[in-house]
Image (cartoon, helix red, strand yellow):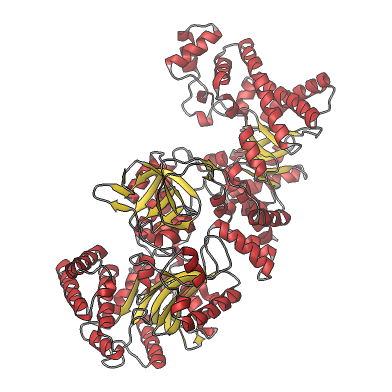
């Protein structure tokens, strides 16, 4: 029979850390902490399998679940001597979610469950503190009503703010027991007004309502969005963790906090976190009160005059430090901890591997390897390749003047400039229009997940370093400044007040998440220097990986950038991208629109020296590394003049009438140009184009070789081949030009001629094409288009719907479709090697920078991946991780 519930407490547990898939991350780690003998409030976990059963059966529960939950409550009672609803020894519980992957703030939690009009009196008598009891009850009503009953959280906040204002109070902690009784009466009246029913008093009804709410929150909008952004499968489900409550709001000897065993922003080896005296956990992350530093060193660094935990609760602090060190050594990774101190006694509520910035991840990996905690191979495996993107973008130029309008907390490093927006809806809308925006909020909530993703950076006026905005921004790699308390946001008027200045939606600001500054206007940025820990991890990765990493580049700037990021050559130089500027586009149009070979050759003679000089510079930058140059590929319509002014300009150069040129343009029109007269079809129709490009390549190879003294071995790639005879025809022209240039220059040129596999027919007939081709480069952008019959330019209109409805897991243009397109790549690789055992194989579509696709390339045994310059470090790291996994 299926076991739905696993208990833990008092040094024993039915589960352990390895049961993460079944118990979720929180449940597995609670069990593990119990087994380690740490102080964990007793409780039980309802499994992720129960969640999946819940959704598969119309949101009902397994028949045996009720009995197992009752037995688990008896287990808690046996350890605590307390029961739900008991008139003397009252048990209150927390009900929390816990998926196997950390999803901070995305799902729902209920604290203080079991309170009602009768048991609140029991809690007051048992604790000897009526104020604490009624504070806990009002929290429970507010949280349960929102999470389970669907009453808006703001409804209660408005009541509370009004009550505080009437009494002249600023802080919740100023309210007395009688004040809280009055608030509770208003809360209950509001619930009945909103729902037509009184607030539920039965603890069992409360418990099952909370369990159902946690399961239901797995499918709420923010959780669905978070899973989509982080590629978390829907089928994983969430567990439910139910624990005896411990109270951080039981007076001045109680507290609650969140901490990391190392700094999640910088990676520094020092305890890092915040806490609040006389509070519950939600207060810390909600940003309602300003938290205090845990350590005295952090308090001094922050310039805070509020005492640290180390100072005011030294015994609890010492226990926490010892437990933190023990957990980091046990898990061999930085831990994210939640704790509560109840009247001086420390309780651990959670441990998990903490989220961190890319900079911190690199430092931790290098430091932990140096400490002997992990191996270098493990250190390389610890870094999420995609997270390196955080380090590969501009930071503020230190020489630039800074017009500082506010300073908050440096919640997530990096800098961003954008137009102000005050809502997540506006952030998404502006992003869709191609605008860069900064999302400005009083505080973010899980409902803001889509806006945070759309924004360049996030700015909040409330919240600490462990607030929702800070944690989510760090996970996304977005710059964030939180807790900028001198700013005033007015959503109604759409204004941001700062130091006497008023900013409105659309005004440009810059935020620096590394030091917490908010700056007026756009500020000059600098490219990062990738040294230190970054260089160390890259060096270790390069020693591990098998595949080479090249770049897709055709401009000198891109080629230099890619080399600085460690590219080992160019895997794709798209020659058509070299023709779109200035006089080049006019000469290109002249060539295309000429109706005789002589006219085309006349235009090509103008383009030859331009192409040659481009190739010389690329060969010099790559200094003897391989450079794959693709012959002209795109549909001709991309070059054709569109306006009357452009037509007249080309007509003047060609000395023909504008009307004649207009007729020629119309004659070249294609209904489906992406599947039309492009690629090798151009070289077959107009061999002189391929001949000009081949001459430019080979003359450049000779010149660059003479200049650098290093051999240049160009790889000439013929695009869109589907038939061996197509490649034979074009290769004959290439070889003839190579022979002519060698004769003219007196130099021997080593070169390869190959093709891009981007058509299903080419993949199926690869063994035949390999008789001519000396290399294959998989153009997976077009191979995905032609395999699916989907235009990547139009797919956005329906692919997201496909994802939401579970038809595809992810966009096949972002991450390679392994079952279809991947099979074509695998087939072509096998067939190509069968004919030509030493054939060079690479990938040059955008998938060459996608870690999941790179893992597949390693499995297939490709020789290299090629990607855009900024993704080169990502590919280097992903290739190393793939080699370890495949080995």
Q: Is residue 532 above or below residue 16?
A: above
When the figure is inspected, residue 781 is found, relative to residue 158, above or below; the finding is above
The part of the image, by quadrant, that contains residue 176 is bottom left
Residue at 35% in and 65% down: 286
Apparent side of residue 816 relative to residue 306 in the rendered image (left or right): right
x and y, in percent, of residue 559 in the image = 65, 37
Residue that sits furthest to the right in the current view: 746
Of residues 332 and 728, the one nearer the viewer is: 332
Name which quarter of the figure residue 698 lies in.
Answer: top right
Q: Which residue is found at the position 31% from the left and 47% from the top?
A: 500
- Residue 147 lies in what quarter of the image? bottom left
Residue 267's spot in the image, x, y percent?
57, 63
Asked whether, in this view, residue 703 is left or right of residue 27, the answer is: right
Look at the image and tell me in which quarter the C terminus lies: bottom right
Residue at x 57% of width, y 18% of height: 583
User: In this orientation, which residue lies closer to the viewer: 82 or 373?
Assistant: 373
In this rendering, is residue 150 above or below 573? Answer: below
Q: Is residue 15 visible?
A: no
Viewer-nearest residue: 789 or 413: 413
Indicate the position of residue 207 as horizontal and vertical percent values.
Answer: 31, 79
């Amino acid at each position: 029979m299926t076991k739905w519930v696993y208990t833990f407490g008092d040094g024993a547990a039915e589960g352990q850390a390895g049961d993460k898939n079944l118990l979720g991350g929180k449940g597995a780690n609670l069990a593990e902490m119990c087994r380690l003998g740490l102080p964990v409030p007793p409780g039980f976990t309802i499994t992720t399998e129960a969640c999946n059963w819940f959704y598969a059966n119309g949101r009902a529960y397994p028949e045996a679940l009720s009995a197992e939950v009752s037995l688990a409550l008896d287990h808690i009672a046996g350890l605590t001597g307390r029961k739900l609803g008991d008139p003397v020894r009252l048990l209150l519980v927390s009900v929390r979610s816990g998926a196997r992957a950390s999803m901070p703030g995305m799902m729902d939690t209920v604290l203080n469950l079991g309170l009602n009009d009768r048991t609140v009196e029991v809690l007051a008598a048992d604790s000897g503190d009526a104020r604490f009891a009624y504070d806990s009850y009002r929290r429970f009503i507010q949280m349960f009503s929102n999470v389970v009953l669907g009453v808006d959280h703001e409804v209660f906040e408005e009541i509370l703010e009004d009550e505080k204002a009437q009494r002249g109070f600023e802080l919740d902690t100023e309210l007395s027991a009688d004040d809280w009784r009055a608030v509770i009466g208003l809360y209950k009246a509001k619930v009945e007004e909103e729902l037509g029913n009184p607030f539920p008093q039965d603890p069992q009804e409360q418990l099952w309502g909370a369990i159902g709410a946690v399961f239901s929150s797995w499918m709420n909008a923010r959780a669905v969005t978070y899973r989509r952004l982080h590629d978390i499968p829907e089928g994983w489900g969430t567990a439910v963790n139910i624990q005896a409550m411990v109270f951080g709001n039981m007076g001045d000897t109680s507290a609650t906090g969140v901490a990391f065993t190392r700094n999640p922003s910088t990676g520094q080896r020092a305890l890092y976190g915040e806490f609040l005296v006389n509070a519950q956990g939600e207060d810390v992350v909600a940003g309602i009160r300003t938290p205090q530093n845990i350590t005295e060193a952090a308090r001094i660094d922050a310039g805070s005059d509020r005492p640290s935990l180390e100072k005011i609760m030294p015994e609890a602090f010492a226990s926490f430090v010892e437990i933190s060190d023990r957990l980091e050594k046990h898990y061999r990774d930085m831990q994210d901890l939640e704790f509560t101190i109840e009247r001086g006694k420390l309780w651990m509520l959670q441990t998990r591997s903490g989220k961190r910035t890319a900079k911190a991840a690199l430092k931790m990996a290098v430091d932990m390897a140096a400490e002997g905690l992990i191996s270098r191979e493990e250190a390389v495996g610890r870094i999420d390749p995609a997270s390196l993107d955080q380090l590969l973008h501009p930071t503020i130029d230190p020489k630039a003047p800074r017009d500082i309008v506010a300073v908050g907390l440096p919640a997530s490093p990096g800098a961003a400039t954008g137009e102000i927006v005050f809502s997540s809806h506006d952030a998404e809308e502006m992003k869709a229009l191609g605008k860069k925006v900064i999302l400005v909020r009083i505080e973010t909530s899980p409902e803001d997940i889509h806006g945070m993703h759309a924004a360049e950076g996030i700015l909040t006026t409330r919240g600490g370093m462990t607030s929702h905005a800070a944690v989510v921004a760090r996970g996304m790699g977005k710059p964030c400044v939180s807790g900028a308390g001198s700013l005033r946001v007015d959503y109604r008027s759409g204004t941001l007040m700062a130091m006497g200045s008023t900013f409105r939606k659309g005004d440009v600001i810059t935020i620096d998440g590394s030091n917490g500054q908010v700056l007026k206007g756009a500020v000059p940025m600098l490219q990062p220097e990738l040294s230190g820990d970054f260089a160390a991890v890259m060096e270790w990765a390069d020693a591990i990986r098998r595949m080479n990493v090249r770049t897709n580049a055709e401009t000198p700037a891109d080629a230099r950038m890619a080399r600085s990021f460690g590219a080992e050559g160019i895997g794709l130089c798209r020659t058509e991208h070299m023709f779109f500027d200035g006089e080049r586009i006019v000469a290109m149009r002249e060539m295309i629109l000429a109706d005789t070979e002589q006219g085309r050759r006349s235009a090509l003679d103008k383009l030859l020296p331009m192409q040659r000089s481009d190739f010389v510079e690329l060969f010099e930058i790559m200094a003897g590394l391989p450079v794959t140059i693709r012959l002209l590929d795109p549909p001709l319509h991309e070059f054709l003049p569109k306006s009357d002014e452009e037509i007249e300009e080309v007509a003047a150069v060609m000395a023909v009438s504008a009307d004649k040129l207009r007729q020629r343009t119309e004659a070249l029109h294609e209904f489906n140009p992406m599947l039309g007269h492009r690629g090798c079809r151009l070289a077959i129709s107009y061999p002189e184009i391929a001949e000009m490009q081949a001459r430019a390549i080979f003359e450049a190879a000779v010149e660059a070789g003479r200049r650098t003294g290093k051999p240049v071995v160009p790889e000439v790639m013929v695009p869109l081949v589907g038939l061996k005879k197509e490649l034979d025809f074009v290769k004959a022209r290439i070889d003839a030009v190579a022979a002519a240039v060698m004769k003219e220059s007196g130099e021997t040129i080593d070169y390869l001629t190959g093709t891009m596999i981007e058509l299903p027919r080419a993949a199926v007939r690869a063994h035949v094409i390999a008789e001519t081709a000396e290399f294959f480069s998989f153009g997976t952008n077009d191979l995905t288009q032609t395999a699916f019959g989907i235009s990547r330019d139009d797919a956005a209109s329906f692919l997201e719907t496909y994802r939401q409805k579970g038809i595809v897991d992810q966009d096949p243009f972002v991450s390679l479709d392994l079952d279809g397109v991947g099979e074509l790549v695998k087939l072509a690789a096998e067939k190509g090697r069968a004919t030509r055992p030493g054939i060079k194989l690479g990938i040059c579509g955008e998938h060459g920078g996608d870690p999941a696709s790179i893992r597949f390339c390693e499995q297939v045994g490709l020789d290299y991946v090629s990607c855009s310059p900024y993704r080169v470090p990502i590919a280097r790291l992903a290739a190393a991780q793939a080699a370890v996994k495949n080995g």
